[in-house]
Amino acid sequence: MMNPKNTIVCFRNDLRLEDNPAFLFAAGRGGGVVPVFIWAPEEEGAWAPGAASRWWLARSLESLRSDLNKKGLRLIVRKGGTVKQLARLVREADADCVVWNRRYEPAARKREREIERHFRAKRISVLSFNASFLYAPGQIKTKTGKPFQVFTPFWNACLTQEVSAGFGKVPSRIQIPLKWPQGISPDRSGLYPPCADWAAKFERYWEPGAGGALKQLKRFLRKGLSDYQKGRDIPSDPGTSRLSPHLHFGEISPKRVWREVFRHAARAKKSGMSKTAEVYLRQLVWREFAGHLLYHFPETPERPLREKFSRFIWREDGKSLKAWQKGRTGYPIVDAGMRELWETGWMHNRVRMIAGSFLVKDLLISWTEGARWFWDTLVDADLANNTLGWQWVAGCGADAAPYFRIFNPVLQGERFDPFGKYIRRWVPELSKLPDAWIHKPWQAPAEVLEAAGVEPGKTYPRPIADHAVARQRALAVFSRI
DNA sequence: TGAAATGTTGGGGCG
DNA sequence: ACGCCCCAACATTTC
């Protein structure tokens, strides 16, 4: 057999070297390895990466580039037209094989089929792998072969299947191609968001890249996991894993997370899966469920899964939408969440549900507006997770909250932020209010407000909707479906 | 991965 | 000592 020529590894949402099947395949194949990243947002349809995602991506690519350099490899960044660029790279790098890890979003799958068709016709081998899920989308099915639409049976079905082992260590020596194709630097590719000031703040909160992902996992295992069941619901505490952006960009593999959580919990508990580990792993499988649903129902980013909701008439209310986006609804827990999002590119999941419920049920504004805003501002923006989350809140998706499940922002605040720690951090103009009023400043006596320096309507907005009234309205409107 | 309305129970104040 | 009422506290139903 002839010696293999060079192999192109097309990086996508798998920005790591460990546990990366496409990269490991290329490294083990014998020829030189040519790592490339092609920036082609115009190929993502309506869902080109948002501003926060682009900030993360640019930083993560720098990290990947540096990790590759340590192996003597370069990262070739190209812009525009994935098929065209890959075809050029194959010629310029003298390659006979193109490999990648699959993405499962509808637009990405379409692109991958084009790549396969193009190269098969040219006798270039193409090979792709699942690196982003524990179970490849499409793998988990009901007994009748249909996709699950309820989480718990999906979870049970997952548990009957072994999570396959990871993909092994990166070899210490990787063959380098004789000549490198030209690339551009990521900052010339248009990745950086237009408003750099806004994204600059993110530097304080995140470390994109495989190194940062691993650090975050270790931190979570050390500090968050043992009290996860309670801690995950307290938005003022660092009780959640905060792995979502790292997982989205594939800086760490879910298999590795699964393995390490399992091992850590087993060591602490002698045998079996401890309760707290199970609660976390369930969350990880919610991510699987989201990927699975988007795979089987590719139209759901734009349309409700449950048909009946298509004819629901949402309110058009630009003013309220703006107030929600800016964290000026007058409901402290909602505003704190929206401001945390704007400041850090992330929001605690408990607060995502509260803020989402407020938009959809209290304001009767379409979940797609919420999804669009999150898409642009979240560093962990992920089409599958975002779609599932918003359809869940609106009650129009799989295993969704029933229409009458409406969050009361005051009660939720009092239950999950009893001492107002989260509010005081993100809504500082209320910080001097006593705990008893911090979640409902409009009810506070005048002297309390004055002592705290709060002037309703001036220093902090009055509620833009009366929750009790809004709840009745939502019940009336939703019950018609 | 709610909240409000409604129903039930049991202790204690009081005539 | 007894029955009546009030109302927390908890449970169940309804939206």
Image (spheres, coloured by chain):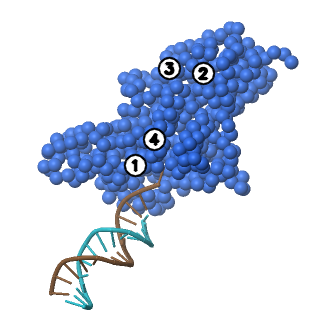
Chain colours: A blue, B brown, C cyan
Q: Secondary structure at mark 2?
A: strand
At 14% across and 44% down in the image, what residue appears? A451
* Label 1 Cα neighbours within 10 Å, binned few <14 / some 14-19 / many ≥20: many
Q: How far apart are labels 2 and 3 at the CA level?
A: 13 Å
Q: Quadrant of residue A168?
A: top right
Q: How far apart are labels 2 and 1 at the CA level?
A: 37 Å
Q: Is residue A465 left or right of residue A192?
A: left
Q: Nearer the viewer, mark 4 or mark 2?
A: 4
* Label 4 Cα neighbours within 10 Å, binned few <14 / some 14-19 / many ≥20: many
Q: Nearer the viewer, mark 2 or mark 3?
A: 2
Question: Between disc 4 and disc 2, whose residue precedes?
Answer: 2
Q: How far apart are labels 3 and 1 at the CA level?
A: 35 Å
Nearer-the-camera pick, A9 or A414: A414
Check residue A224 in the rendering and tell me which mark sits there, or answer none: 4
* Amino acid type of the residue tagged 2 in the rendering: Phe
- Identify residue for label 3: A190
Tell me whether circle 3 and circle 1 mark residues in contact (CB < 8 Å): no
Check residue A354 in the rendering and tell me which mark sits there, or answer none: 1
